[in-house]
Image (cartoon, rainbow, N blue to C red):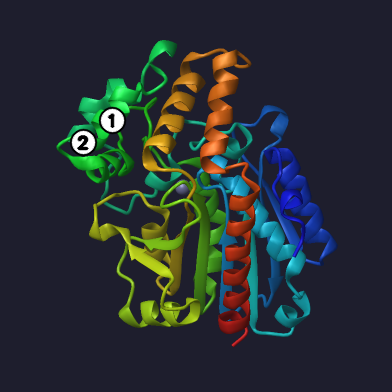
Amino acid sequence: MQDVPTLFSEDYQSARKSFCDAALSKGWSLQSHQRDGGRDGELFTDIARIGAEHPRKLFVLSSALHGVEGFLGSAIQRQLLETLDIKQIENSQSAILIVHALNPFGFARIRRFDEKNVDVNRNFLLPGEDYSGSHPFYRQLDSLLNPKKWSKWELPPHVQALIKILPYGVQNLQQAIAQGQYDYPLGLFFGGNEPSSTMQMIQETLLPEFQQAQEVLHLDVHTGLGKRGDVQLLYDYQLQQSEENQLQKLFGKQFKINNVSEHYEAVGSFYRWLRNHAPQTATFCWEFGTYGPITVLDALRSENAASHWSDRGSKSFVKAKEKLKEAFCPQSPKWRTQVLNAAQEKTETVVGQWLLK
Ligand SMILES: [Zn+2]
């Protein structure tokens, strides 16, 4: 395995360059799609591909739907590029797609959201659904979650403590907030009021790939949910019992595969939409835990406020960005090694035990 520190990039541009260089030098085909929101057109979603043109089985590994979460996603993708023997894929009826930076704006600007402040994973509505509405509890929390003055950007310790013992409980609080909202365009977890640029790019460029394969396994790397170092697959649609059994067998009985729709109803998820449009796809949010929910929420809250209300380059702006990056990609070498090792083991299993079988 490659040295862990070299797989983690300092910023989006160096992550992109390392990804493209590795893909090309290892013999993958590479397509680059220019994206909105960049200064001097510097933002791209890059797609590396190897294997059969009309594959029987397709493995898709994507990153940075939530921008800043792309630091780990990009590292996992490069690790796969560096370690995979492409000959065995080329000689098979299978294919692999590695999609680098679904939301390059968020990755480059250290945001979880896109160029229109949209949480892209709340933006994938199905026919008949509207970009409107929010949880009643979110409305009560708006001024706390989305402050406009610097003095309020740090969640005071007593508020943090209060949140923990609110009648709703921390888990319900997390759900009320994280399920998304469509009424506060500058607020956290805003789902947008139209299809985002990322959704459109996916629809035009990636969806046909999903639809033409007979069987698809899609892992979309995220960070910031679950216990530190924990790894789990999350989904929110009707997964067949036989599919779940197959995955549980593949990854081992201990591995966590969780249906989040058992806990709360959220619209706009990428996975539910993808499953709806390409039913032969088993698609998952591949989550890696970093810090607890209060720390993560606190970091999101100050960064969102700084992005809207503070001067770029000001002390508070820079501090908020650093805090967010740490919340979603801890500097700790122990964490970085642990999660990359776990990811390597899983991608090897997917390729060796599923894709090439
Ligand atoms: Zn995420």
The part of the image, by quadrant, that contains residue 134 is: top left
The secondary element bearing badge 2 is classed as helix
Mark 1 Cβ and ligand 1 under 8 Å apart: no
Q: Residue at x 74, y 58 (%)?
A: 30
Give the alpha-carbon distance from disc 1 to disc 2, as whole Å: 7 Å
Q: How many other residues sit within 10 Å of disc 2, few (<14), some (14-19) or many (≥20)?
A: few
Q: Is residue 49 above or below residue 37?
A: below
Q: Position of residue 204 (x, y in %)?
A: 54, 54
Asked if residue 241 lies left or right of residue 311, the reply is left
Q: Position of residue 16 (x, y in %)?
A: 72, 46
The secondary element bearing badge 1 is classed as helix
Q: Residue at x 53, y 42 (%)?
A: 328
Q: Position of residue 254 (x, y in %)?
A: 42, 73
Q: Is residue 196 above or below residue 31?
A: above
Q: Residue at x 56, y 40 (%)?
A: 68
Q: Is residue 243 above or below residue 96?
A: below
The answer to whether residue 306 shows anywhere in this view is yes
Which amino acid, by three-letter code, is at mark 2? Ile
Q: Is residue 326 above or below residue 254?
A: above
Q: Residue furthest left?
A: 167
Q: Position of residue 356 (x, y in %)?
A: 62, 84
Residue at which label 2 appears: 165
The disc at residue 161 is 1
The answer to whether residue 134 shows anywhere in this view is no
- Quarter holding the N terminus is bottom right
Asked if residue 1 lies left or right of residue 252, the reply is right
